[in-house]
Image: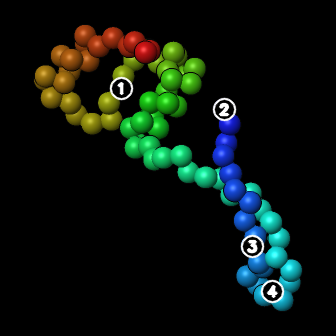
Amino acid sequence: MSVKYNIVELGNPTNREASKKFYASIQSSGRLSLRQLAAIAADRSTLADQISTVLPRFNPGKQFKCMLDNIEFNKN
């Protein structure tokens, strides 16, 4: 994966008399939603393969309990 960047000249904010230095600044190539970022992380993670059960931290209703009994995990 390549990363696009620009070279920018920045001064020292605490000492305005100091000479400026050049730094690399990454160029944005777009935006991702939190859901898209989570999907990318899940795709590259090996931890999703180790999940075997779901333990909700709230009191689920009857319909949700029924759904948990029939849940299957599939990594895309």
Depth check: give the residue in front, 13 or 72. 13
Q: Earlier in the sequence, mark 4 or mark 3?
A: 3
Name the residue furthest left.
62
Of tags 4 and 2, the one toward the viewer is 2
Q: CA distance from mark 4 to mark 3?
A: 12 Å
Q: CA distance from mark 2 to mark 3?
A: 27 Å
CB contact under 8 Å: marks 4 and 3? no
Depth check: give the residue in front, 59 or 54. 54
Q: Earlier in the sequence, mark 1 or mark 4?
A: 4
Relative side of 21 to 13, left or right: right
Q: Work out whether 72 lies above or below 37.
A: above
Figure quadrant of the C terminus? top left
- Residue for point 38% across, 38% down: 35
Residue 39 found in image quarter: top left
Q: Quick one: SS at disc 4?
A: loop
Q: CA distance from mark 1 to mark 4?
A: 55 Å
| Circle 3 residue | 10
| Circle 2 residue | 1
| Residue type for callout 2 | Met
Point out residue 15 in the picture as x, y percentages from the top left corner: 80, 86
Figure quadrant of the N terminus? top right
| Circle 1 residue | 55
| Residue type for callout 4 | Asn
Point out residue 36 in the picture as x, y percentages from the top left corner: 42, 36
Of tags 1 and 4, the one toward the viewer is 4
Q: CA distance from mark 3 to mark 1?
A: 51 Å
Relative side of 67 to 21, left or right: left
Q: Quick one: SS at disc 2?
A: loop
| Circle 4 residue | 15
Of tags 2 and 1, the one toward the viewer is 2
Q: CA distance from mark 2 to mark 1?
A: 37 Å
